[in-house]
Amino acid sequence: MRRKKLYSLLDPEGEPRGALRLGVPQSLSEIALPAALSALSQQFPGLSPQITCGWSGQLQRRLENGELDGMLAMGPAQQSFAEGYSGRLLCPLEVVPIVGRRLNLRASSLRECAERGWILNPDGCGLRAGLIRELQSQGLRLTLNVESAGAQLQIALVAQGLGLGLVPRAALASSPWRDEVAVLSLSDFQPAVSLWLIHAQYLANLQPPLAFFASKVMQQLTVSD
């Protein structure tokens, strides 16, 4: 209710000004954030974007605590949201398991390759959590070779043969190491991830810049794919 009262003070028809607090998933920030922020500043010069990069679950808690106006999230195609918040499904987001070509690994299932170990984001990442759930469903354990944030660093380490990776295809497409890694086609592990825009329902004149920012992020993901 307090947040609704604060947003009600904004002129719904006025030019957006002041802070726009945005959350962006860590896995997408390297791919899409610079260009999307530049476009946002040009389109809405009166705004002062404040960006928080992190894992989707952590960002959603900050949104519900009133620390963010809106956020992009990676998650399943079906979701429910807390009272007072809205979510819009933006697009599917392809996520792929990868391996260094130097390993010459031929695997068609998760069981055949999991023992090689993984290079993954720290705990809290939704992609990592999804992988762990699938491993556990097959009676397998996660072998973690490297724990580090940043898709490009992970792709570089995978290219060196230090383990398997799990990254958005758009990140792989824009990576300077893309020719040194191969995408694994695993019959029992095909991550289904979607990109969402989540925000408070009462945004007044902050709604247009938030939607604009989301559209530019999607545009960058398409360009990189």
Image (cartoon, grey):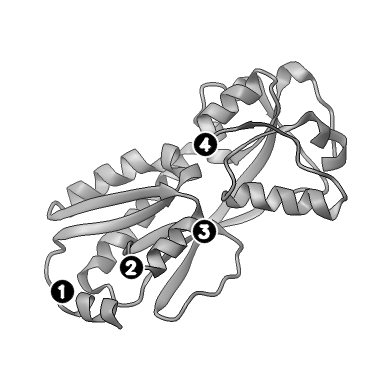
Q: Is residue 47 left or right of residue 136?
A: left
Q: Callout 2: helix, strand or loop?
A: loop
User: What's the residue type where badge 1 is placed?
Assistant: Leu
Q: Nearer the viewer, residue 225 or 10?
A: 10
Say which label, 1 or 2, has the lower sequence index: 1
CA distance separating discs 1 and 2: 16 Å
User: What's the residue type where badge 4 is placed?
Assistant: Ala
Read off the residue under disc 4: 149
User: What's the residue type where badge 3 is placed?
Assistant: Gly
User: Mark 1, residues whose alpha carbon is within 10 Å: few (<14), some, or many (≥20)?
Assistant: some
Q: Which mark is residue 66?
A: 2
Read off the residue under disc 3: 57
Q: Residue at x 22, y 81 (%)?
A: 5
Task: Check contact, mark 3 vs mark 1: CB within 8 A.
Answer: no
Q: Position of residue 25 (x, y in %)?
A: 46, 49
Q: Which mark is residue 10?
A: 1
Q: Is residue 147 above or below residue 69?
A: above
Q: Is residue 93 left or right of residue 104?
A: left
Q: Is residue 186 above or below residue 191?
A: above
Say which label, 4 or 3, has the lower sequence index: 3
Say which label, 3 or 1, has the lower sequence index: 1
User: Is residue 191 something that shows in the picture?
Assistant: no
Q: Nearer the viewer, residue 9 or 124?
A: 124
Say which label, 4 or 2, has the lower sequence index: 2
Q: In terms of image quadrants, where is residue 192?
A: bottom right
Badge nearest the viewer, 1 or 2: 2
CA distance separating discs 3 and 2: 15 Å
User: Mark 2, residues whose alpha carbon is within 10 Å: few (<14), some, or many (≥20)?
Assistant: some
Badge nearest the viewer, 4 or 1: 4
